[in-house]
Amino acid sequence: MDGLLQDLISPALIPNKDGAVLFFPIRHHSPVCSCQLERITARFKPELILIEGPENSNDLIPVLTDAHTRLPAAIYYFYKDKKKYISEEAEDYHCYYPFLESSPEYAAMSAAKALSIPAAFIDLPYSEILIHTKDFEGLRRMQERHSYADDSYLVNSRFRELLCQKTGLRSFEEFWEKYFEIAGLRLEPEMFLHQMYTYCSLTRNGTPESQIQADGTDVREQHMAYRIREKMQQYGRILVVTGGFHTPALVTLVQRPVKPLKLHKFPEEQQNCYPIAYSFEAADALNGYASGMPHAGYYTKIMQGLHEKTLPPEEVYRQLTLALLTETAKKCSRKDIPLSIADVTSAYSMAEGLAALRESPVPGYAELWDGVLSAFIKGERTVASSLPLDILEKLATGDGVGHIGDTSHVPPLISDFEKQCRTFRLKYETIIAQEAEVPLFGGLRDAEKSRFFHRMAFLDVHFCKRKKGPDLHRNLDRSRVRELWTYCRTPEVDAALVEHTTDGTTIEESCRNVAAKRIRAEFRTGTAAQICVDCFLMGIPLVEHEVMQEILSGDGDFFSLGQGLHYFDMLCELQVLYQTYDPAYRQWLEYCFSRLLVLLPPMAGVQAEQAKDCIRIFRLLHGVTGRLFPERQEEFRQALISLLMQPKTEPSVHGAVMGLLYAMDAAYLSQAEQAMQSYLMGTPEHRREGAHYLHGLFETARDIALGDGNFLEMADSLLQGSSYADFMEILPSLRLAFCHFTPSEIQQIAERIAQMHGIRDDLLHGTVYDEALMAFGAELDAEVMREMKA
Amino acid sequence: MNALKGEYDLGLTISYKDIMEQHLIKPPVEIRYAQELDFLSRADTGKRPENWKLSPKAVRTFIIGGRVIAPDGSCMDISRKFYGNDALVERCIITLAGNRGLMLVGEPGTAKTMLSELLSAAACGCSTNTVQGTAGTTEDMIKYSWNYALLISKGPCREALVPAPLLIGMESGIFARFEEITRTPAEIQDSLISVMSDQILNIPELGEEGLILARPGFNIIGTANTRDKGVNEMSGALKRRFNFETVAPVRDVKLETQIILREANDLARAGHIDCPVDKDVAELLAITYHELREGTTAEGTLIDKPAAVMSTAEAVSVYFQTLCHAWYYGNGRMELPVLTENLLGAVCKENQDDLEKLRSYFNTAVKQKSTREGGIWTDYYKTSSLLH
């Protein structure tokens, strides 16, 4: 280390009245930082510990260090920009501040508790950080989740690149593990602090000032310095624990007067924070955005080993390497990748050997990974063969969920959730999965219960799942009158509910706002109509009428509008049954209908694979015309005729349209027959299309085959005129065409065909003979006849 | 060099002087880099596995390069010989120091063979103890065979025994390299299992003398490519006795350019071609190979990947051919039409569709670059008429 970094003197300790202020730079979730922080706290004996963190969450420090709180936990911050301080969009913002056992901030809070001294967060409130951050920077970057604990400056600097290059290491994580996590364990706390400070100073020096200003880092640091100076008046010995990047700046800033920043005041419903149980997966996913050490589970186990103090620090790494190799091998064996003790031994030797070669006293995660790669993957490394590495990564991520001991800070959405669970007598205080049967039409209370489940499902918080009951989205089981739900309240449910805090303070309000958000982001009628179905089931009227109107008028996709027609038709039909009335459904249905009639003629040239969906929409249009808009039947008929006038028509669509025209007016029979005739008289390719025509025709007007028309004769001539190869090709379509008939109708058709060919009725009902055997018999007969003639 | 003499005289006792006098086409690694190996050996203070010529750290330095300072204060810059994944090199070294064989797998032309030669030369001082796997490889070629004249006259005895690389490796405590192992029939591959498990080779004809125990330092480095046709899948039992390392193609254009230049320079020196290499042409070729291999251009345009192997080794070959043409037929300057013709020959080997893919690469990617960057890319684009 000293060879790499110059001997810079650490100025991390500055004098104060009757004492000193000690600045301890950390990397988030780093076990070595936590360990050394604990050791230095014991030596320094501070009277106050100040920690980097939004100061509006100071009340939550006792909740996190509560004896009944189990990590991982996080503080969830939200801010609603109603007054448009950030942008004209008045958006909602949220972020997490996760704590693991290996988090130095948690070690600092625990140390303060153990020493019975105060601890406090000193950073700007979350809202102020956002207000001082430019678009697409810091906590306003475009990503799904934001973590307050951001290490990107430490991890992504140009200095880091040069270090990796010089030390021949693949990544910053490898560098950090080798030179800090492992090597730092044996150092005296002062020396560790010195090295950390040096590293952080060099990183800081290489970072442009413009970048520091863009994400509000400079304003935050000024505020932190102001708070430290404030406390310096009251306390003598202060320990300041901040992310390593800020420490060098803070040391300079606190040595001169700092102007206080004027803070905005927000009501609780616009800015607040809550403690939430967190999971290792979630913490690790956040770390993907350079928000602390990766492999949360791995380093938590290291931290636990170091805390136990039964083994020397290096031995903790060795033991964990062996344990994870064994566990990975076991899990691989369960996935049909046979790995033996010899493989584990080989992987462990590899990890140890690599550690020696890389001059590290013990194997770390990088060596463990290399060991698995080398000894567990047999053959070329591909996505499929990398399963052992995937398993290792999963083990290193960890799979536990935390728990918040002190329940006095419950977010409003969770309160409402619990209240409703109590109202509907749902067992929500257990993590064992429960079942609830809900009669759909039994009364208002049951209807409300069903709506509650649908609301929870809509919020996608993994609380409940419908096992049985009508599925309006897929149009299945609509005759069912009960729903069967399974539900289970896990910590993930709480975490997910908290994420919806920005959407509303009650479940109903959240659902309404989420539905509104989704519909505003939508541009396809079909998907928007599905959201309407959700709202219908949740008993929440959709108020975004104008948005819906815009979607409908802007959507030019025939299939999407067809989907919309189907859903709105269904909702109109079910309004009475579900006791949910909304006149907008009929209005949107009619709009879809009108748009579809306009878009119908060009559907003549639809691709064969889309023909089925197209015909389904034609049938629906026909049904809707008959039931709801009889006065528009002529309009529909004209649209169908326009389709037939197109230069080229897909055969099954052609058949379906002829069928619909015949259904509306029997006079179209001759035209349908003529069309069939033209297929029969055409080239072999056209004859093959005849089967598709029949398929479409029977789909919309199967009675045409049973009437007085010549369709069966024509179908017969189609078959007779086909070669064996052509017949085999059209057979699936023919089978499909005739599947629209009931068994008795098929019997009737068979008898008519038998009559046509002079075949006895009994042959239709007798034993079924093998086709090959029949052919052989016929050949044999012919041969015998020839012989006899001879 | 001593390892070559070892217990057997392989007739390969050549020296640096011999090379200079005899002008060998491709001298073995231990000869080519004799000075570096010698210096590393003198400077090496690390622990060495038994019978290894260098410590694992020194082996790594020999392969990935670096500055070495000897105890006497002298200093030498060791050249980097293998470009790409340094961690892979480290894993290879640790595998060879253990009790498992090393199997290098990957696409053709990814320097698997070169890496196995470097490892053998650095650890054992001998990179020539090699079996080349083919469909016709037999057990005799791997283990041992007999000098039949001696066998008839003296009966089965050590004198009549003709050792093959596996036996040589076992008795000398050096690595046996098995090239293209998956080309040999599965039953021949499996003959390695007992040797790798028990480190014993039994020659029943020799009676009690026939039990050959492997000396420390013995190991096997296999190479197998994953792209070629006509390969035999290794058995699970044999796979278990190897650690596998997948050698990936070089993904960095700058690095690939460097490799092309360095290799072409070496080949030119060996062939006494005193023609300057052209860095711009090397970069152009590296970009072409990189983009065709990845199926996308630097500008993000999607292009069809040819079925042919687009390895760095192929790129070196195309570049060197162009250099030779410039030397023998031209004015000593590399010409782009010749480069394109050589590229055509390298890409369109088996599949006729590859010609169309190459042509469309020129008509999209090269055309775009010629419009945007001009210069050499414009000249390169003009040669697209030769693609037919």
Image (tube, coloured by chain):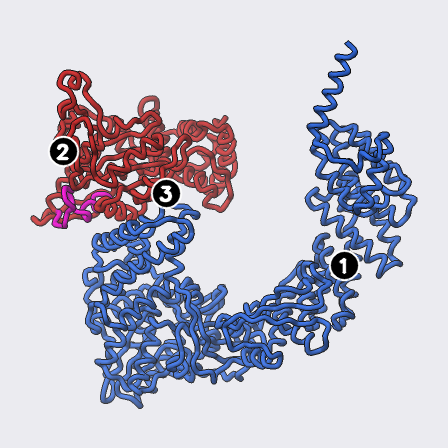
Chain colours: A blue, B red
User: On residue A592, which mark appears?
Assistant: 1
Furthest residue toward left: B72
Q: Let me know if residue B181 is in the magenta part.
A: no
Left/right placement of residue A134 relative to residue A345 reads right
Task: Give amino acid for label 2.
Answer: Met
Q: Residue at x 71, y 78 (%)?
A: A444
Q: Which subunit holds the residue at mark 1?
A: A
Q: Respond whether the residues carrying marks 3 and 1 are from the same subunit.
A: yes
Chain letter for mark 3: A
The residue segment tinted magenta is: B44-63
Quarter of the image with the N terminus of chain A in it: bottom left
Give SS at disc 3.
Answer: loop
Can you identify the residue that label 2 sits on?
B1
As drawn, is A755 to the left or to the right of A449? Answer: right
- Rounded to the nearest angstrom, the CA distance separating label 3 from label 1 is 57 Å
In which quarter of the view is residue A576 placed? Answer: bottom right
Res. A153 visible in picture: no
Mark 3 highlights which residue? A379
Q: Are marks 2 and 3 on the same chain?
A: no
CA gap between label 2 and label 3 equals: 34 Å
- Vertical position of residue A556 compared to residue A31: above or below: above
Q: Identify the image quadrant of residue A190.
A: bottom left
Q: Sequence-wise, which precedes: disc 3 or disc 1?
A: 3
